[in-house]
Image: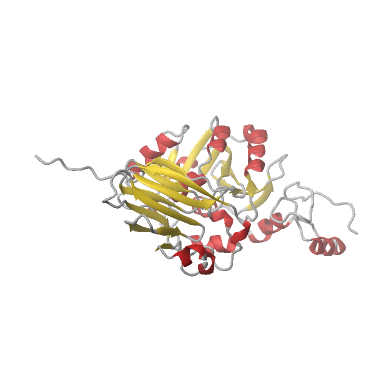
Amino acid sequence: MVKNFEKCPGCGSEIQFVRPGKPGFIPLDVYEKRLKEGKEILCQRCFKLKHYGMLTGEIDEEEISKFLKNFIDRFDNILYVIDILDFEGTYRAEIDEIIGRKNVIYVINKFDILPRSISGVQLKKWLLERIPNATKENVFMTSTKNGFGISKLQEYLTKLKGDMLVIGVTNVGKSSLLRMITNSKAIVSPYPGTTIGVIRHRLGNLRIYDTPGIMVNDRVIDLFDPKCQATVLSKGEISRKTFKPYPNEVIFISGLCKLRAELKGDHNLRPIFQIYAPEKVTFHKTKSTEFITNFSKYFGKELYPPCGKFDVSKLSFKIVDFEIDEEHELSIPGLCWINVKRGPVKFKIEIPQNVTVQSRPSLIKPKRKVKKH
């Protein structure tokens, strides 16, 4: 029997053996071995931070909200990294409300993956309408893939002093971004008085604290294991497919989302819309009752993700209805967005219960119709 659990010197969390991925966790056999050998005992997350420079595990929304509310005043600056391909899933209004009174820098990552028809000016205008605390001066569009916008962001940050906290939902590219804008060696360091392990960087007179990714529960991608998530997002590319379905056809987007669509008002015409998703996400249109009923048989093949076997019986599903015109898009966090070309379109979507589907102003504007004289 292990006695006298201690606190992790890396993050200050109490050592625990039952919640992997959470602060303080260490496998019991590893703990006992290191205790017997008289070696330093770090929780699993801090051990990987110190020895491998790996930021593992996630902070859930409750944990990061508590952290921000209690320690926000200790930071002069906040760097909030957002994935533009999954804006609704990675921009959290509740977090922005907490940090908004500080000097917030919004970094909109993965800009290069957007369709070329979307200009930087157009995107910034769209962002300023969506983020209450955003201004023309504090929004930076970047790409860690080709270096777009990095030098401009770096130049801005070198003028700052004090401490800066870096936050973002999982898979937004925080670590890659920081590797590009700083040349300092990562240092494992708990921020004083907190239980959250961080990686510390330095850029000029600015001390940068990178927190683990915030784990949320309303995105499709989060329903898969980390290995599958990494595989789905590995190429960092986006695919686009145009659909013009009949009312009796079902469109699968991955294996966990299926939708039906019809044009409102005119049953002689079919709706036209485009779906944008990470390149490895599959689209499959069918009217086969057998396929629709036994769809889990096709996981990892025609329907991807899931990446392989997946127990779909553990999920509860809901059906949501949306009517989307050509001035709006449908966003399914952690999966895709849908841009209407001929509408309004009445969508009926079957999706896991926890996923919050949203309508938003169109990022890809409809082409203006030329008036005939």
Q: Given the current orientation, which residue lies at the most extreme top position?
A: 101
Residue 265 at least partly seen? yes
Seen at 43% across and 57% down, the residue is 145
Seen at 57% across and 48% down, the residue is 354
Residue 82 at least partly seen? no
Seen at 48% across and 67% down, the residue is 290
Quadrant including the N terminus:
bottom right
Residue 257 place in picture, x, y as percent: 49, 56
Quadrant including the C terminus:
top left
Residue 94 place in picture, x, y as percent: 56, 36
Q: Where 9 falls versus 39 (above or below)?
A: above
Question: Going by the image, does 51 lie left or right of 305?
Answer: right
Q: Where 97 falls versus 109 (above or below)?
A: above
Residue 284 place in picture, x, y as percent: 42, 63
Question: Going by the image, does 332 lie left or right of 210?
Answer: left
Seen at 63% across and 32% down, the residue is 73
Question: Going by the image, does 7 lie left or right of 279?
Answer: right
Residue 318 place in picture, x, y as percent: 54, 49
Residue 104 vs residue 69, the one in the foreground: 69
